[in-house]
Amino acid sequence: MTASSGRPLVLGLAASLPLLACLALTTVRAEVANAPAVLVLVVLVVAAASTGLRSAGLLAAASAAVWFDVLLTRPYGQLAIHDREDLEAMALLMLVGVAVTELSLWGRRQQARASRASGFLDGLVASADAAQGADRPVDVLVADVCERITAVLGLDRCRFQAVPAGPGVPRLSRTGALTGRGSSHDVDRDGLPVDTEVAVEVTAAGEVLGTFLLTAASRVIRPTRDQRRTAVLLADQVATALVTRPRPDLRRSSAAQ
């Protein structure tokens, strides 16, 4: 089941489970205080929020608050509360639902960020190991780095040429900044250019040994600064190999897409 196809089911459960729980609790509402009922509903709200869908968490909180009012507080069967403690419990349900939903989403974002960072580091380590392998042909190393840069940035294409980029081509710096044509580009806001390639130069001792040319033409992509810096570091892995190893004529571009 894909995320999109499963979304209606999650939202349906988020809306209906608090109702079912309240219906079940009506059988003991005369003997049990509302505090335990609130705890049961909070558990359902937390479960909905843990799906990572903000709408599911908020829907579960709203459903729990409404059905708690209608079925478990006097006057029963009406959307009205006359008892102050019941009103506070209903408000608490809504606040908990919002808070837990936002915390769950924040936690998922942090987990995704950590996972991406781990993936970037694994790619750098693998490329560094490959660059140190004396028996690995330079053109194979260049192609591997092209593939890794493509994956890190989400590019359409990456190619390498053993000459500097032209003067009008935007360049990606070690800081992750994109500059060219006399100005800087806000990649976070505008994304990578779709009408031109972006250059990542490979240098050693101040000399440009070659250039990775990045293409993102089919859609606007907005790689983070960390992703952009990782791409530059990946390109750097090629410098030592270009200086120390015999290599074929790389003026004929090596490409990955």
Image (cartoon, rainbow, N blue to C red):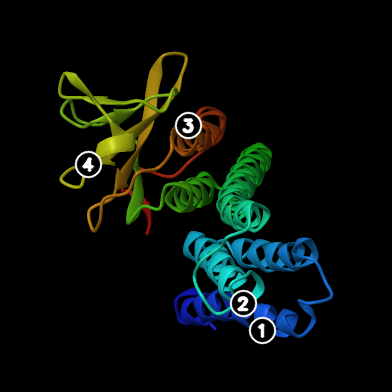
Which mark is nearer the camera, 4 or 1?
1
Residue 222 is tagged as none
Image check: 239 left or right of 134?
A: left
- Disc 1 marks a residue whose amino acid type is Leu
Residue contact at pointers 4 and 2, CB within 8 angstroms: no
Report how many numbered discs are placed on residues in the image. Answer: 4
Residue extending furthest toward the top: 206
* Residue denoted by label 1: 23
Q: Earlier in the sequence, mark 3 or mark 2?
A: 2
Residue 193 is tagged as 4
Q: Earlier in the sequence, mark 1 or mark 2?
A: 1
Q: Earlier in the sequence, mark 4 or mark 1?
A: 1
Query: Does 108 appear above or below 43?
Result: above
Residue 71 is tagged as 2
Residue contact at pointers 1 and 2, CB within 8 angstroms: yes
| CA separation in Å, label 3 and label 1 | 55 Å
Q: Earlier in the sequence, mark 3 or mark 1?
A: 1
Residue 229 is tagged as 3
Residue extending furthest toward the right: 31
Please identify the quarter of the rendering in which residue 128 is found.
top right
| CA separation in Å, label 4 and label 2 | 57 Å
* Local SS, label 2: helix
Residue 17 pos. (x, y %): 63, 79
